[in-house]
Amino acid sequence: MISRILRGSSDAFEVLITKHYKTVYNICRNFMGDDEDARDMSQEVFIRIYNNLDKFRYESSLNTWIYRICANTCLTQLKQMNRLKTCSTEDCTLPDDKEMSPEDAYELKELTRLVEDELDNMGNTTGKIMRMRLFGMEKFKDIAGKLGLSPSTATSIFTRSKRNLQKVVESYNKEVNK
């Protein structure tokens, strides 16, 4: 599909949009906190995907690459809107008077990369379940149907993998905060 898009196939790009729109929108919605902003950011994300598809290096999955574009696009927009705020790990309420420092932004980027790498290393089915639930906000019933699993199996895999991911993130946070 990527090579067809790069050769100028608008049909192939429409397929990419159709396949990834819900996930892109949900990621943008999580970052922006508003439906209208999420729609605007989703449109911007697909423009960036189209303009940068020739830079996709196949070092990660297309889903991971798209997630990075979503995150970077939303973070850049939030920064421009002076809405990028910090929160502690214990209490994630956003103070109105504190912007994210460059160090915090770097930490967020590194943590995002760590989570993406962990998801890539989880295996095909587990990684899909995690991405569909975490980024796509899909119901376990829908995830199970798409992957040919029972909802209880999808839930169990997600719960176990989420605990493992939390341990990795906690270990990272301990290392960073030494």
Image: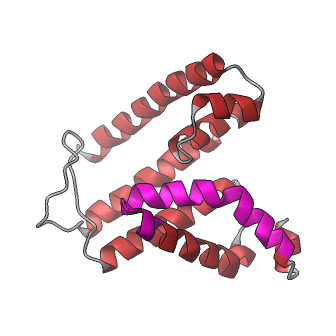
Report whether 107 appears left or right of 69. left
User: Where is residue 141, by image quadrant?
Assistant: top right
Name the quadrant of the C terminus: top left
Q: Nearer the viewer, residue 102 or 64?
A: 64
Q: Position of residue 46 (x, y in %)?
A: 63, 73
Q: Nearer the viewer, residue 155 or 100?
A: 155
- Secondary structure mostly seen in magenta is helix
Q: Position of residue 10 (x, y in %)?
A: 83, 78
Report whether 74 appears left or right of 8. left
Q: Give the residue drawn at x 72%, y 36%.
A: 124
Q: Which stretch is magenta?
A: 11-38
- State whether residue 170 is above or below residue 106: above
Magenta residue check for 24: yes
Report whether 35 appears left or right of 137. left
Magenta residue check for 54: no
- State whether residue 4 is above or below residue 8: above
Name the quadrant of the N terminus: bottom right
Instruction: Point out the residue furthest to the left here.
Output: 97
Q: Position of residue 22 (x, y in %)?
A: 61, 55
Q: Give the residue drawn at x 52%, y 43%.
A: 137
Report whether 172 appears left or right of 89. right
User: Where is residue 37, by image quadrant?
Assistant: bottom left
Q: Give the residue drawn at x 51%, y 68%.
A: 39
Q: Position of residue 27 (x, y in %)?
A: 50, 56
Q: Give the residue drawn at x 77%, y 70%.
A: 14
